[in-house]
């Protein structure tokens, strides 16, 4: 018996809009699926929840708009509760789809199960939505069209999954183009499923819509359309914004990774030469020793399995710095490193310990003969002239050799190689020495002295002795120079020549230099508290001048002890002062800006730039003791001193002659016009309490109170 059905028509513009929404929703769905796959942990969960909501709403809205496109000759409407249930079904099927998309791979079983689950969800969404039309009598369904719609739903789901997993391999513009094409296919498939399902529905002539007062009307459809397009657009914009943030985060992560890699490189490589530094060398030495110890337990029939350490120290490197400047010295050190690289094998390690000291770790050697061969190659490599400021400079090296396990235990290898190197240097340099047991005493003493020096500041064992600078005319003490001493608990008073090179080698000089600055300012303040105004000179090394914060440290010490800046004189060597580096120039300018007086020490031994000397605003020139020693008997030395005095006075500088040891030297220097004299002829460096043992008060031209032991006055009377 045939049933007469109501004629159903469709508004083409609304149908077109529904298809567009389906394609747009598919594009967003693919984008969200990709994002779900790329995220992990909490972010994946958040994107999954938000993605299911947006994706489900987009697909559901297409179905709802499509149903609103259908026109019947009776008034229809959609029950709100059932319509909401269909929306929930749409969100649920989207969650299933995103869950499958987050998998690492798509097998056949997963594809079949996923397609069926997604198809069932889409059908549930559609047919629950159709059930929101509460018709009396009910809707008549054409089973053939229902089957077609179910097949399309499952097929479209399978295609969507295949498309998504296939797109993972694409990047950039290709990925976006593929995503747009896939969205077009998916949108048409979803629309085909929807309108197949709509074609399966028949409405009996004379039917009534019991939900006619529910959701209905063209305006409602437009509202849903605008809302869902806005939602999808926001989702797409958020995804794009996240992409940019992710890209920026990725770039920042890459930069951070590069920075970390650079920091790692800087932490283990010497900044000047690019070879491993002490930290990396120590680590490789420990590993090499451990390998040799393991090989000793299982000897090889082919021999080998030993290691050697070669300690290389340049002979005569300090004059290069003094003559040409530290920048030229750095150039030489780089050339030395390059030549040593040519000597070592790829399995060996070349490291710079500091200054002009290098060490070579030779692994898997047969014994001492192999190490000696390498030492000979080093000698030949360093014997060729170095180019410094277009001049040829020749250097040699003292090399200490120690073999493990033949000569020393693993923890004493470096100290033993160091001791052997000093033995080579004592024998005249330019050669190598193999470690012997009697050298260990010297190595142990050096090691113990280094360890004691590390604690010297904390134990208050460092001392400053003060050597007076005497006014050449009045015989009064005009100022003093602070000279460092170490009151060792067992060795007694140790001079700087014994421990300062050690401090420089092992990186202790910065802390000691800071102590000298603070202690000198403290002593000036202590004298001021007793009513005695004194100017004190301290020596700043080339190492300190390279510290960008040295001027700030000096300023802090002056402020901390409440002294006048002009009571402190900073002595720097002529070579260091003339070094044309940005840091050195800035430090000298900052010291001058503090009001600290500057003194150029060892003047006459370097290559001074008169223009820089004038710009530097120095207050004092100290004539090097080499010229003072010969000034009374050598006409050339006298001429040099006379020229320095005239030059200094022309520039308004105070002239100090150091190293005065005889009355003849004193008389000549006074005759040549030196302003102040300093040396053993007047007094050795004294502790502050000895300096004040006999005090004589007088007022000099500047109104300052001078004082000195009476023996000094008798000498100059």
Image: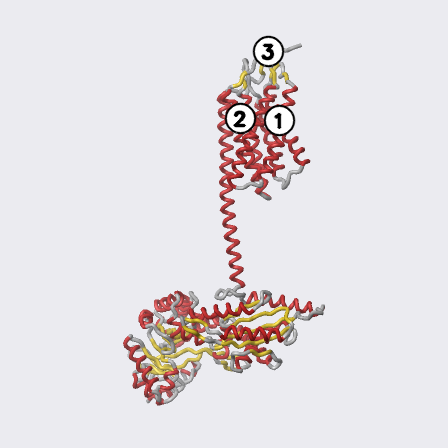
Viewer-proximal residue among 367 and 99 = 367
Q: Residues within 10 Å of mark 2 (few under 14, many from 20)?
A: many
Does residue 213 appear left or right of residue 464 in this picture?
A: right
Quarter of the N terminus within the rendering: top right
Q: Residue at x 51, y 32 (%)?
A: 231
Mark 3 or mark 2: name the one nearer the start of the chain: 2
Q: Residue at x 31, y 83 (%)?
A: 639
Does residue 299 appear left or right of residue 456 in this picture?
A: right
Residue matched to label 1:
152
Residue 260, relative to residue 369: is it above or below? above
CB atoms at circles 1 and 3 under 8 Å apart? Answer: no
Which image quarter: residue 191? top right
The reply to whether residue 524 is in sight is no
Task: From the image, state whether disc 3 or disc 2 is nearer to you.
Answer: 2
Residue matched to label 2:
19
Q: Which mark is residue 205?
A: 3
Q: Residue at x 54, y 41 (%)?
A: 171
The reply to whether residue 31 is in sight is yes
Residue 438 placement (x, y as % from top left) = 61, 82
Label 2 sits on a secondary structure element that is: helix
Separation (CA) of disc 1 from disc 3: 29 Å
Label 1 sits on a secondary structure element that is: helix
Q: Residue at x 49, y 31 (%)?
A: 230
Separation (CA) of disc 2 from disc 1: 15 Å
Residue 180 placement (x, y as % from top left) = 52, 34
Separation (CA) of disc 3 from disc 2: 29 Å
């Amino acid at each position: 018996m045939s049933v007469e059905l109501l004629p159903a028509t469709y508004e083409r513009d609304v149908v077109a809009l529904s298809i567009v929404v389906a394609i747009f929703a598919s594009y967003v769905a693919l984008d969200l699926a990709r994002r779900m796959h790329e995220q992990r942990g909490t972010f994946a969960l958040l994107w999954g929840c938000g993605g299911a909501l947006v994706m489900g709403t987009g697909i559901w809205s297409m179905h709802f708009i499509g149903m609103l496109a259908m026109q019947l000759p009776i008034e229809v409407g959609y029950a709100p509760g059932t319509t909401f249930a269909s929306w929930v079904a749409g969100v649920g099927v989207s969650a299933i789809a995103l869950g499958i998309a987050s998998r690492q791979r798509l097998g056949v079983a997963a594809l079949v199960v996923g397609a069926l689950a997604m198809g069932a969800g889409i059908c549930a969404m559609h047919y629950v939505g159709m059930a929101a039309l509460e018709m009396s009598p009910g809707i008549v369904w054409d089973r053939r069209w229902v089957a077609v719609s179910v097949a399309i739903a499952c097929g479209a789901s399978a295609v969507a999954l295949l498309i998504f997993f296939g797109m993972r391999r694409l990047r950039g513009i290709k990925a976006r183009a593929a995503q747009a094409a896939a969205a077009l296919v998916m949108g048409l498939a979803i629309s085909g499923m929807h309108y197949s399902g709509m074609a399966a529905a028949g409405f009996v002539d004379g039917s009534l819509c019991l939900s006619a007062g529910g959701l209905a009307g063209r305006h409602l459809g437009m509202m849903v359309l605008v809302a869902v397009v806005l939602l999808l657009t926001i989702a797409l914009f958020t995804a794009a914004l996240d992409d940019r943030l992710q890209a920026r985060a990725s770039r920042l992560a890459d930069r951070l990774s590069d920075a970390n890699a650079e920091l790692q490189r800087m932490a283990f490589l010497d900044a000047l030469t690019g070879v491993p530094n002490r930290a990396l060398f120590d680590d490789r030495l420990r590993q090499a020793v451990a390998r040799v110890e393991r090989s000793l337990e299982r000897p090889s029939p082919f021999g080998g399995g030993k290691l050697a350490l070669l300690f290389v120290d340049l002979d005569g490197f300090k004059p290069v710095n003094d003559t040409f400047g530290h920048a030229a010295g750095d150039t030489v050190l780089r050339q030395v490193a390059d030549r040593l690289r040519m000597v070592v094998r790829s399995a060996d390690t070349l490291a710079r310990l500091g200054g002009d000291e290098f060490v070579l770790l030779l692994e898997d050697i047969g014994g001492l003969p192999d190490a000696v061969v390498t030492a000979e190659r080093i000698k030949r490599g360093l014997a060729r002239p170095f180019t410094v400021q277009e001049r040829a400079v020749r250097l040699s090296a003292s090399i200490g050799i120690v073999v493990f396990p033949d000569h020393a235990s693993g923890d004493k290898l470096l100290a033993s190689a160091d001791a052997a190197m000093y033995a080579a240097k004592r024998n005249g340099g330019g050669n190598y020495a193999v470690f012997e047991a009697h050298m260990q005493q010297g190595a142990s003493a050096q090691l113990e002295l280094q360890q004691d020096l590390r604690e010297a500041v904390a134990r208050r064992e460092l001392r400053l002795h003060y050597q007076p600078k005497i006014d050449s005319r009045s015989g009064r003490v005009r100022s003093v120079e602070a000279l460092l001493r170490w009151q060792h608990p067992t060795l007694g008073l140790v001079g700087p020549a014994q421990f300062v090179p050690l401090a420089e080698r092992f990186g202790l000089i910065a802390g000691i230099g800071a102590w000298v600055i603070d202690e000198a300012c403290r002593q000036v303040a202590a004298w001021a508290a007793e009513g005695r105004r004194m100017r004190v000179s301290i020596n700043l090394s080339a190492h300190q001048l390279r510290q960008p914060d040295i001027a700030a440290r000096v300023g802090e010490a002056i402020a901390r002890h409440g002294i006048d800046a002009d009571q402190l004189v900073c002595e720097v060597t002529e070579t260091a002062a003339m070094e044309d580096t940005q840091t050195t120039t800035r430090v000298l300018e900052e010291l001058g800006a503090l009001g600290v007086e500057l003194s150029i020490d060892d003047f006459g031994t370097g290559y001074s730039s008169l223009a820089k000397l004038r710009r530097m605003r120095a207050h004092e020139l100290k004539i090097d003791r080499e010229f003072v020693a010969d000034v009374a008997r050598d006409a050339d030395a006298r001429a040099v001193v006379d020229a320095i005095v005239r030059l200094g006075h022309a520039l308004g500088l105070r002239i100090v002659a150091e190293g005065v040891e005889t009355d003849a030297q004193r008389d000549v220097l006074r005759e040549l016009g030196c302003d102040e004299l300093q040396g053993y002829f007047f007094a050795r460096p004294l502790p502050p309490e000895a300096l004040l043992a006999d005090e004589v008060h007088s007022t000099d031209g500047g109104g300052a109170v001078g004082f000195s032991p009476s023996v000094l006055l008798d000498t100059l009377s």
